[in-house]
Image (spheres, rainbow, N blue to C red):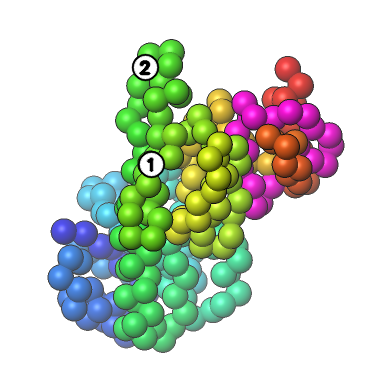
Amino acid sequence: MIHCLIVEDEPLAAELLKSYIEKVPDLQLAAHCKSAVDAFAALQRQPVELMFLDIRMPRLTGLELLKSLPNPPPVILTTAYRDYAVESYDYNVLDYLVKPIPFDRFLKAIGKFYQRQTAQPAPAVSQPDSFEQAYLFFRVDREQQKVWLKDIHYIEGLGDYVKIFTDTGHIVTYERLAYLEEKLPEEHFARVHKSYIICTDKVRSFSGSSVNVAGKQIPVGRMYKDRLTRFGR
């Protein structure tokens, strides 16, 4: 059962979400909070698997709530404003729903939640060769495909999808680049551009504006230039 938290100060919007949750057998409403402040307290008492979060609320906005949570649950943003769509990607949210929310669009967002669960990180291993043994599973066409982390050259973000380039070719899977940035070990991977994560072990050369990874020139974004110091050690 997927326990859900609704954070919404508009009664009609909250009731609509409640009715949608009731229609999906795997979903169960854990709580409804009318403010982000109440939601912060509720999450300390009872963690949930999925949060429906409004953005514009008094005292504390939904995005400010996300900033304050060290380990937020998967989040689907709900708002009457499209202005925050680009900013929301920085918070690794599952989806961005604009009110009034149709049921089919709600189901599509839930589908993204299910797809996110398919990427399972390898268990942490304390031995020196743990990176050699580490892997992730990714959904590719209806199958779960194992990808060894040591084989990854770089990952390119394509909106809601990523293209993962490895020793044997590449795969495309539904996943956010920000999510992988959190999951991949930082001693072997670095985000160097809003659209690229590279394996630092595969760096052949670099300049102030690009990195050569396994023969591919990857651009370096202005925000990420400080990470180039890792390659010059």
**Do we see residue 7 in this rendering?**
no
123 in the magenta segment: no
Left/right placement of residue 72 relative to residue 47 reads right
Res. 71 image quadrant: top left
Q: Return the residue at label 2.
A: 126
Q: Which mark is residue 55?
A: none
Identify which amino acid the numbered label 1 is placed on.
Lys
Q: Is residue 2 above or below residue 187?
A: below
Q: Quadrant of the N terminus?
A: bottom left
**Labels 1, 2: front one:** 1
Q: Position of residue 54 (x, y in %)?
A: 42, 70
Residue plotted at (49% across, 41% down): 182
Q: Return the residue at label 1.
A: 146
Q: Position of residue 53 (x, y in %)?
A: 39, 66
- Front residue of this view, candidates 96 and 215: 215
Identify which amino acid the numbered label 2 is placed on.
Ser
Residue plotted at (32% across, 75% down): 107
What residue span does the magenta drawing correspond to?
193-211
